[in-house]
Image: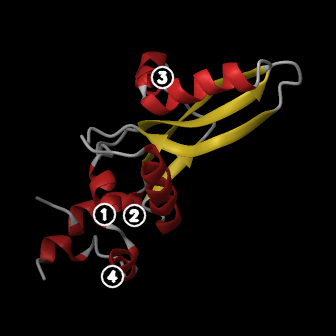
Amino acid sequence: MDSSYKSNIHPSFAEIIKQMSPFDALLLREFPTTKFSACPTVDYVSTDISSKKYRIDLHNVIFPRLTDFDVFQISKSVSSLNRFGLIAIDKTLLFSDTNAYDVFLQTDYYTEQTQLAKLQYPKCQFEVKKYVSYLTPLGKDFVSACMHP
């Protein structure tokens, strides 16, 4: 083993690798590794305009730079990476530049669900709840030790 990686190796890494899907690994590479970096993350929600109650239709969606992606697979993978402890999801933080979230409003999923909400549920509004996700210290070590170029 390369001694420069020895201090970054955690015993759980072997089990995490066994449980990760190839898509999880691709998605993990999308997370920035610098100290103060995060990914814009959203939940797609349906909100009843009169009661202000909402239902989460799709959790934990990030918008990676992958060409072939499916928002449902992204949601599952983000949840899985969070379960492994490689990423953290913080629903109390969001980017001050809200333009970072515009890309979520341009997806086919958002367009379809917005139109569906208007047709079927006139008192319902489809929207995004904005927050961030980021690599944990364990996640940074995992990327450094197991996914380096």
- Report the amino acid beneath label 1: Asp
Q: Which mark is residue 14?
A: 4
The location of residue 148, given as percent across then percent down, is 16, 61
Residue 69 appears in which quarter of the rendering? top left
Q: What residue sits right under mark 1 in the picture? A: 141
Please, which colouring scheme is shown? secondary structure
- Report the amino acid beneath label 4: Ala
Q: What residue sits right under mark 2 in the picture? A: 138
- Write the residue at 46% across / 24% down: 101
Per the model, the C-alpha gap separating discs 1 and 3 is: 33 Å
Q: Counting other residues with Cα less than 10 Å from the Cα at mark 2, is it few (<14), some (14-19), or many (20 or more)? A: some
> Is the C-beta separation of discs 1 and 4 under 8 Å?
no
Q: Nearer the viewer, mark 2 or mark 4?
A: 4
> Is the C-beta separation of discs 3 and 4 under 8 Å?
no
- Report the amino acid beneath label 3: Leu
- Report the amino acid beneath label 2: Leu
Ranked by sequence position, the earlier of labels 2 and 3 is 3
Ranked by sequence position, the earlier of labels 3 and 4 is 4
